Amino acid sequence: MIRLKFKNDVASAEYSMARPVLSALRPKAGVKLADLVDNGTLERVESTEWVIPLAYIQVELQGEHRKCTATNRHKGVFKYTRVLFVIGSELAIFQRIMETALASIEGALVYLDDIAIIGQMIPRTYRDWKKW
């Protein structure tokens, strides 16, 4: 489950649940997970600054477009102020914004709401990313 928090008009996500595993498979899954951690295939992540979950909702809708996003809820009619996946071209808009923002980072590719870092110069790309 993801909870969104807004502070100074910036959204951040808070994760509260891990991926569920069937009860019958938990012992085997635990052993497999431990093996993957032990052999270096997986590494535990405590917190991260580079993940931008639900970042597209940080793109504000212009005033004249907000009236097109009306939604009727049990407490009245509301309009969205941020771009959401329920709007037709928001993915293309968000992808263009991210491509423009990351244009100076060699090896950074944007596909929809994912950022991929590719190439043989990963350390240099990571250094560029940290500067950004």
Image: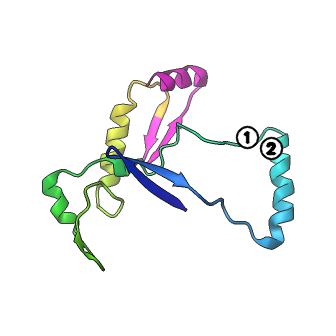
Q: Is residue 73 left or right of residue 130?
A: left
User: Which residue is most to the left?
Assistant: 64
Residue 46 part of the magenta segment: no
Q: Nearer the viewer, residue 36 or 81?
A: 81
Residue type marked 2? Val
Instruction: Please state which amino acid type lies under the numbered disc 1.
Output: Glu
Q: Position of residue 123 (x, y in %)?
A: 60, 22
Query: What residue is rendered at 51% in x and 59% in y?
Result: 2
Segment tinted magenta in the rendering: 109-131
Chain-order first, disc 2 or disc 1: 2
Q: Between marks 2 and 1, how big is the CA–CA gap? A: 6 Å
Give the image's coloring scheme. Answer: rainbow
In front of the other: 78 or 41? 78
Q: Quadrant of the N terminus?
A: bottom right
Q: Is residue 35 above or below residue 121?
A: below
Circles 2, 1 touching at the beta carbon (< 8 Å) = yes
x then y, percent, for residue 99: 37, 36
- x and y percentages locating residue 97 in the rendered image: 32, 40
Name the residue furthest bottom. 74
Identify the secondary structure beneath mark 2: helix
Left or right of residue 47: residue 10:
left
Q: Which mark is residue 37?
A: 2
Residue beneath disc 1: 43
Q: Is residue 114 above or below residue 3?
A: above
- The residue lying at 46 percent from left, 36 percent from top is 109
| Residue that appears at 49% across and 26% down | 129
Picture coordinates of residue 69, whole percent (x, y):
23, 65
